[in-house]
Image (cartoon, rainbow, N blue to C red):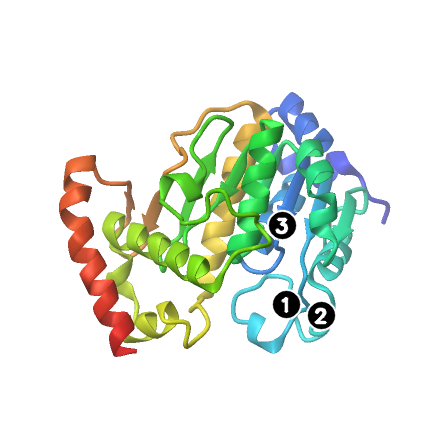
Amino acid sequence: MSFSYAEFTNRNLGFVDAEGQEKLRKATVFVCGTGGMGGAAVLALARAGVGKLILADIDTFEIGNMNRQVFAFMDTVGQHKAQATAEIVRTINPEIETVIYGDDWPDHVGESVAAAAVTINGTDDLAAGLLLYRTARAAGKTVIDAYASSLPSVYVTRPGDPMPEERLGYPTIGTAWNALTAEQRSKAFMAEIEHVMVHSSARKYIDMALAGEMAAGKRKRMSFAPMVITTGMLMAYETIAIILGQTTKTDCRGWFFNPYEGKVERPLPGLLSAIITPIARRQIAKLVSAA
């Protein structure tokens, strides 16, 4: 059967109108990190009919990715993540245009961010994130991201918004993205975990002893398909809204989705946050020391 973009996207109509669908067809999105959250966002964007994806990743698929990464299959294990992802999305939409980068993606970050309506940070690396945010600020572009949380989350950093390193107080300001020390990485990660502990109920839904080992750098991050894929879908929603010129209530501080209680958890007011932060900090320190 011959492919028809109109037939492919026909059931989108009603969620978007014909003009909006054409905007999606002409849109470019840069997704840096096509494994977990980034891969789920790619899947949704490709099926929504986005016309061009710039995909970057430095890794290959592994067996350990298959619990959550939507493009990780037995026949993609060992393949470069961005390349394998591009090949699969072309089976969804043969007309989609893809640009693929591997280890060399930092050499192309300026052109990639500039070409895209939105950049999605699907990496779990501090240095990569800093490069994306700093490049996006210089270009006046938007970055969509999520927290290292056991609850699905999303935040949108628009031009003029404080970047995470400023907002969360990372000790990285003034340091080149590729010159970070292990201590800077650790403190930045702890600042992110502290934010999650203060502003969400994520701690209620995981094994905190294992979380302490993760924070101490003794184990990989815990990941679970429903959380990861839901987060990617939230990223895709925000991306589509930006492409269509729609306004959402998601800002640079973002929010957490609690499926256990069926509610959205938004950042606490300043005074309450100030009261809870020292308590969370002590809890984190206790978990790390016990790991």
The amino acid marked with disc number 2 is Thr
**Where does the image place residue 289, in percent across and percent down from the top left?**
26, 74
Q: Residue at x 19, y 62 (%)?
A: 282
> Contact (CB < 8 A) between labels 3 and 2?
no
Q: Residue at x 24, y 50 (%)?
A: 198
Instruction: Name the mark nearer the viewer: 3 or 2.
Output: 3
For mark 1, give the secondary structure: loop
**Viewer-side residue, 80 vs 169:** 169
Q: CA distance from mark 2 to mark 1?
A: 6 Å
**Viewer-side residue, 269 vs 21:** 269
Tell me if I can see residue 217 in this picture.
yes
Other residues around mark 3 within 10 Å, as few (<14) / some (14–19) / many (≥20): many
Instruction: Name the mark nearer the viewer: 3 or 1.
Output: 3
Left or right of 221: which side holds 75? Answer: right
> Contact (CB < 8 A) between labels 2 and 1?
yes
Residue corresponding to mark 3: 32
Residue corresponding to mark 1: 72
Check the image and report above or below for 210 versus 59: below
Residue corresponding to mark 2: 76
> Contact (CB < 8 A) between labels 3 and 1?
no
Q: CA distance from mark 3 to mark 2?
A: 19 Å
Left or right of 138: which side holds 154? Answer: left
Left or right of 285: which side holds 174? Answer: right
**Viewer-side residue, 161 vs 265:** 161
Earlier residue among tags 3 and 1: 3
Other residues around mark 1 within 10 Å, as few (<14) / some (14–19) / many (≥20): many
Q: Residue at x 45, y 66 (%)?
A: 223
For mark 3, give the secondary structure: strand
The amino acid marked with disc number 3 is Cys
